[in-house]
Image (cartoon, grey):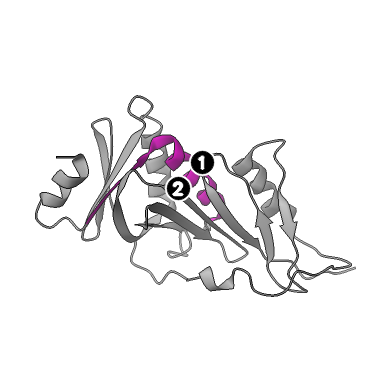
Amino acid sequence: MSTIEQTRAVEGVSYALEVEGESLRELLEGAITHAHKDKDLLALNAVMLEGEGGYLTARATDRYRLIVGKIEVREGEMSPSLISLTDIKRIVALAKEGKISNKVTFNRIGDLLTVSVNGSAITLTIVEANYPTFDDIFNKGEVTALDTIAFNPAFFSDYSKIVGKGVQVKVTFNGENKPITIGLIGDKVEWRALLMPMRYTD
């Protein structure tokens, strides 16, 4: 019986999921660049994780940017789980310990999520907040040429942290005052991202 099957056999366990540690680190380290840094904004100072269809998806937004990344799972699934930015960083630190097995297991029981690596584990509480849905805003508008566009360079610089130096970032303009589509090529993560333009002033 696999770890996932054993976990599901325990009464009360809602979901269990297993992923590669290196893939998880890349996914979460990319997602946290787009989470809001203000802890008072409970829903945005967090990352939404969901495991279904053979993928673990991470979503993050600070209202000005949006990123969605997904990695393949080894097995299992997990219901949508909103995790605070602080706890996401704890998971990243734990995943770095998984170099031997390169395996990270998520077990969710109610509003508690336990993340395990090589016998070490942390348990955290799922954030209860209304998280925005934004899959429907991708591919909105038409690709168009623009004379001028303005964006926050600090926001844009985070993309180099995700794809690394020397890797191209593709920018697609979808119309005036429309979100800019950002094409990112990850090593183990499939990314989609949007950046809101700023109002241009002379």
Instruction: Indicate the quadrant where residue 96 lies.
Output: top left
Q: Position of residue 116 (x, y in %)?
A: 27, 39
Question: In the image, is 52 to the left or to the right of 178?
Answer: left
Q: Position of residue 91 (x, y in %)?
A: 37, 42
Q: Secondary structure at mark 2?
A: strand
Q: Which residue matches tag 2?
A: 71
Does 161 sit above or below residue 192? above
- The amino acid type found where label 2 is placed reads Ile
Query: Which residue range is magenta in the image?
Result: 15-34
Q: Position of residue 188 (x, y in %)?
A: 51, 41
Q: Main structural element of the magenta stretch: helix, strand or loop?
A: helix
Quadrant (top left, top right, bottom left, bottom right) of the C terminus: bottom right
- What residue is shown at x 36% (from left), y 31% (from top)? 102
Quick one: 30 or 170, which is closer to the camera? 170
- What residue is shown at x 85% (from left), y 69% (from top)? 201
Q: Position of residue 3 (x, y in %)?
A: 20, 40
Quick one: 122 or 103, which is closer to the camera? 103
Q: Which residue matches tag 1?
A: 188
